[in-house]
Structures are given as C-alpha cells and as structure tokens.
Image: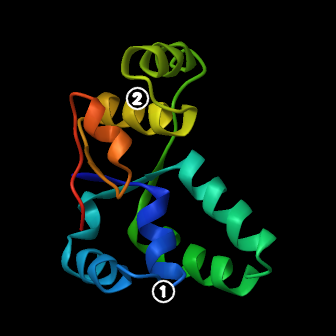
Amino acid sequence: MFLVDSNIFLEGLLEQEQSTKVKSFLENTNTDKLYITNFSLHSIGVLLTRAKKMDLFHRFINEVILNRIEVLSITSEDLNKVIENIERFSIDFDDAYQYTIAKSYNLQIVSFDKDFDRTDLKRIEP
C-alpha cells in the first residue's frame, strides 16, 4: 500500500518532466492500495488555485480523489509525533506529516522528495 506524496500528483497534473512515469504508476497500481494525506490534498489545492488552475483541481478531485484514493489524516495527538519526526530526521513539517501517516498506516511513501531517504521508511519513485 502506498502513500502518494503531493509532488507525484503535481508532476502528473502539470505535465512536468516525469509525468509519463507518474501516469503509468497511477494507472497500473490497484486503487485500493493508494492513499493521500489531507495535507497533500490541501497543498495541491493551494498550488493549483494560486496558479488559476481551478478546473484542473476540480478534475483532480472528481477523477482521482473521489473515485480512486482514500484521504488520510492524523489526529491532534499525533501532531506531537510530527514534531518529534522533524527533529529526529531533520525534515520539514510537510515531510514529517507524510512520514507520520505512513508509519501509522504501514504505508510505503511514493515521492520524488529525497528528504525521505533520511528516514527509516525511505521511499520509492514511480
């Protein structure tokens, strides 16, 4: 089961350099195995709406989120774990949030972000 980082979705949505790999990964992976954090979903929303790409965000929600991927959140109590993971691995808040969710749900992180390589979970790329 995979926790897909926001940079993976943005790479595909914005048709960047590795978008072909991203699309192949998403099309060939069982949707029951794909998860996203609410933090990533909100971050994607912020970036796309700031870029005036509301139609793209709307399509992403309807075609990907509502039909294919479960959105995960941490509890308020788990915010302390996020802080601990920031300090433990010297990673940013967003990475620590993803890491904390991945650990809690026993998920493999799918990301282009090499900061996850400093953790005990590591990561995979599509």
Asked which secondary structure carries label 1, the reply is loop
Q: Amino acid type of disc 1?
A: Glu
Distance, label 1 to label 2, CA atoms, is: 29 Å
Q: Position of residue 49 (x, y in %)?
A: 77, 71
Q: Residue at x 50, y 19 (%)?
A: 78
Q: Which of pointers 1 and 2 lies earlier in the amino acid sequence?
A: 1
Quarter of the image that includes the C terminus: bottom left
Q: Which residue is mark 1?
A: 15
Q: Amino acid type of disc 2?
A: Thr
Q: Vertically, is 100 above or below 13?
A: above
Q: Is residue 63 visible?
A: no
Q: Quadrant of residue 22?
A: bottom left
Structural crowding at the residue carrying mark 1, measured as other residues with C-alpha within 10 Å and reported as few (<14), some (14–19) or many (≥20) = few
Q: Residue 96 versus residue 66: which sits nearer the camera?
A: 96
Q: Which mark is residue 100?
A: 2
Q: Which mark is residue 99?
A: none
Q: Vertically, is 35 above or below 77?
A: below
